[in-house]
Image: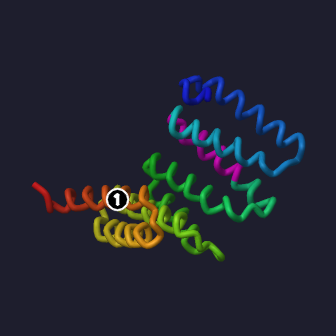
Amino acid sequence: VLRDRYDYAGARVHYNRAQRLYEKLKHPDQLYPLRYLGFLFESSLHDYDGALEQFNQALSIARAHSRHAIIPRLYLDIARVHRQKGSYIAAIATTREVLTMKGQNDPGVRGEALLELARDYWYLGDYAQARENQKKALDLAIKSAKAFLEIQAMSLAGLIDLNEGKFR
């Protein structure tokens, strides 16, 4: 609620308080307030180093407590922040880890990873790789009825077309 009211300092205090309570209880769910802090640092404060710190702490806790379902999403959070920092190679490497994880079958996560790769390559100006991953993400979005992913993939296709001079 505080974040929605633009009270970022208040939100930060409450996320930290929640994380400390979980930590005191030695409860693995402390990774969630850390992740929310990462979102706050990333999207509201534009503090990408702070976001990476929070996401990496959450990832360490997830690994330590075998919270396998959230691990690919944390990797995608980290990759997204790398992209926003302009560290495209780090974003690509982190995203590729998601695609090679054992037991990672969630079509939503796989589609998001493919779209992240497409974005990273687009930012690098490698439109062939961007298009290849965008098409894979779009196909997966359609097959798994992920409407928002489909919209994002179609939007990126338009940007790739624009950069390739297909629209004037």
Tell me the quadrant of the picture where the N terminus can be found. top right
Task: Find out whether residue 55 is within the magenta segment.
Answer: yes
Residue 59: give x, y in percent of width and height: 69, 55
**Residue position marked by numbered label 1 in the rendering:** 124
6 up-or-down from 155: above or below:
above
Residue 61: give x, y in percent of width and height: 76, 54
Tell me the quadrant of the picture where the C terminus can be found. bottom left
Residue shown at the point (31%, 68%) measured from the top left: 131
The span shown in magenta is: 46-58
Q: Is residue 143 left or right of residue 30?
A: left
Residue shown at the point (65%, 76%) measured from the top left: 102
Task: Find out whether residue 60 is within the magenta segment.
Answer: no
Amino acid, disc 1: Leu
Q: Quadrant of residue 47?
A: top right
Residue shown at the point (37%, 56%) measured from the top left: 152
Label 1 residue SS: helix
81 up-or-down from 20: above or below:
below
Residue 50: give x, y in percent of width and height: 61, 39
Q: Is residue 164 left or right of residue 45?
A: left
Residue shown at the point (49%, 64%) measured from the top left: 113
